[in-house]
Structure formats: C-alpha cells, structure tokens
Image: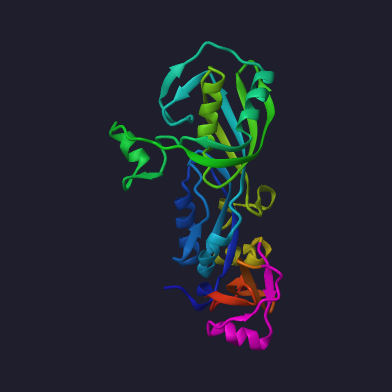
Amino acid sequence: MSSDKNSNLFGFLNVYKPKGMTSFDVVAVLRRITKIKQIGHTGTLDPFAVGVLPICIGKSTRLIEYLNDDKEYLATVQFGQDTDTYDLEGKVTKSYDKKITKDEVIEVLKSFEGEIEQFPPIYSAIKVNGKKLYEYARIGQEVEIKPRKVFISKIELQCFDEKCQQAKILVACSKGTYIRSIAYDLGQKMNCGGHLVELVRTKAGLFYQEKATKLEDIKTKEDVENLLVNPLDVLDLPKRILTDREKEKVSHGMSIPNNTGVNSNIVILVYGGRIYAVGIADTGKVSTKKVFEVLWRR
C-alpha cells in the first residue's frame, strides 16, 4: 500500500531511457521504487532507442494532455539496405549497390521539411480495425495503411560517413512522427535503401537531454522526490494566479473572472506557487476544468 507521503508525490521526472527497455518497462521500475501505481509516460520510445522520456508521477498524469508534444531526435541512418521494421532489429528485405554522397543526402532532406505525409511502419502500435499494425505483420496479414500528416520543423545532416554509408540526422518534429519512416523514405527517395540503426531523443516538449537523469541513478523514492519537476516549469500555457477567495471558488468548480488576456485556451490556475487547477478561458471568465487535491511539494 502507498504511504501518505508517496501518494502525495506530484510532478514530472525527466528520465533518460536506456537501450533495451520499453517505455512501459521504465514505468514499471518507477512503480516498484515509489509504490505508486499512478505513473505514466508521455510518449513511447522504441526499445533500441535511448533518450528523454518524461514520466508523470501521481495525479500529474492528468496533465499529460497539456504538455508540449514537439520532439527532437538525433537519428543514425544506415543506407544500402531496407528492413521490414525500418530499423536494425528487422529482417533485411532488400540490398542495394548504389553509393550516395553527402551532398545528395543534404539535398533530399529538404523534401522532408514542413508538413508531410508519411506511412507508419507496419511494425508499429497504430491500430487499424481494432488491431495493432504489428499484430497483422507478425501473422503475415496484409492491411491497408493510411498516410498520416506530420510536421517537420527542422531536419539537418549532422555528419556523413561516406565509407560506411551512414548519416547522423537531427530531426525536430511534431507528435506522431515516425523517425523509422523518415529513414526508410530517405533511402527510397535516393534509391539506395535505408533503415534506422540508432535513435536518441534529445528533447520532448520542455524536457531536455542535458537535464535528464539516467534510470539506473534513480534507486529510491527519495531520489524520485528530489528529482521531481514542478509542472509549472514545463507547461507552456498561460498562468492565472488565484486569490484566497478565488481558490475557494475554484475548489467548488466555480468560474472566476478572466484577466489573462486570452480566450478559448487552457489556463493553469496557480495558488501558493503551485498548480491548483486547470481552467478554460472564455470571454469574461475562466471555467474550472480540473482541480488537483494534491499540490506539488518539495
């Protein structure tokens, strides 16, 4: 059973996910450490990938939908072969003799900038007719995969090893972007094949790699408590400071005046330097949407 202290933990952890673990594995480890069941992550990383994995502790899971979804990755693409998973863990489906140059990679990367349509890998967790795509793939059943619109705000070649035919590429993108698909599509556009061999998530919203803590360095519930990130520091939304009277009104689900200068937007309601509730700003008022019984503590 969770202790009172544990049940009061409220905030985010910036965890650096190690290679070989699923995102759920990381959650399971932290549940064992804290004895808290209400823990979630904000975006899946493939087992072979490493990097930033924001974790929500306690009632902060109710804030996941308000976090900035933009991501940034450093991807290593191996040219010369396609695989069925679009990464190094799959079976090679085609090999190519063509060799490419650094200038070719730079030129083709330009076609990925802005809003693009991409087909997710067949080995992915996207559901079609109630079944995950990888479940169709494992039994060899064909299924129609529809393209999805994603936005690439930045895609740059960091370095290129012409001898090994390997490129390291920085990608800043919207939620739902498959970097494996970018690797595959890049190879197809240059008619040389390609698949992902390394992936590091360097940024997720306002969580950054340089401030992430390795999972192996989190050993006790005290470590978790000391590493908690105040949600106010990573929620990129308008804030509204509550007076004592307004705090009482909000606690009963009542509206308060809108002096935020924004309309039709989510507003974080703050009391005592901590997040107290989430509201929706409209003309003249802020309506209460969610109230948090447990405030962030350190």
Q: Is residue 128 magenta?
A: no
Q: Which residue reaches farthest top?
A: 97
Q: Say if 238 sits above or below 136 in the image.
A: below
Residue at point 50%, 14% (across, down): 96
Q: Say if 107 sits above or below 264 in the image.
A: above
Q: Which residues are magenta?
A: 237-262
Residue at point 46%, 62% (across, down): 31
Residue at point 56%, 36% (across, down): 116
From the top left corner, tell me how far across and down residue 80 is, in percent. 53, 18
Residue 144 falls left or right of residue 110: left
From the top left corner, tell me how far across and down residue 71 is, in percent. 61, 46
Q: Which quarter of the picture shows residue 78?
A: top right
Residue 94 falls left or right of residue 190: left
Residue 104 falls left or right of residue 98: right
Q: Say if 20 sits above or below 54 in the image.
A: above
Colour mapping used in the image: rainbow
Q: Which quarter of the picture shows residue 269?
A: bottom right
The quadrant of the rendering that contains the N terminus is bottom left
Q: Say if 280 sits above or below 139 in the image.
A: below
From the top left corner, tell me how far across and down residue 105 is, in percent. 64, 23
Figure disc tally: 0
Q: Is residue 249 magenta?
A: yes
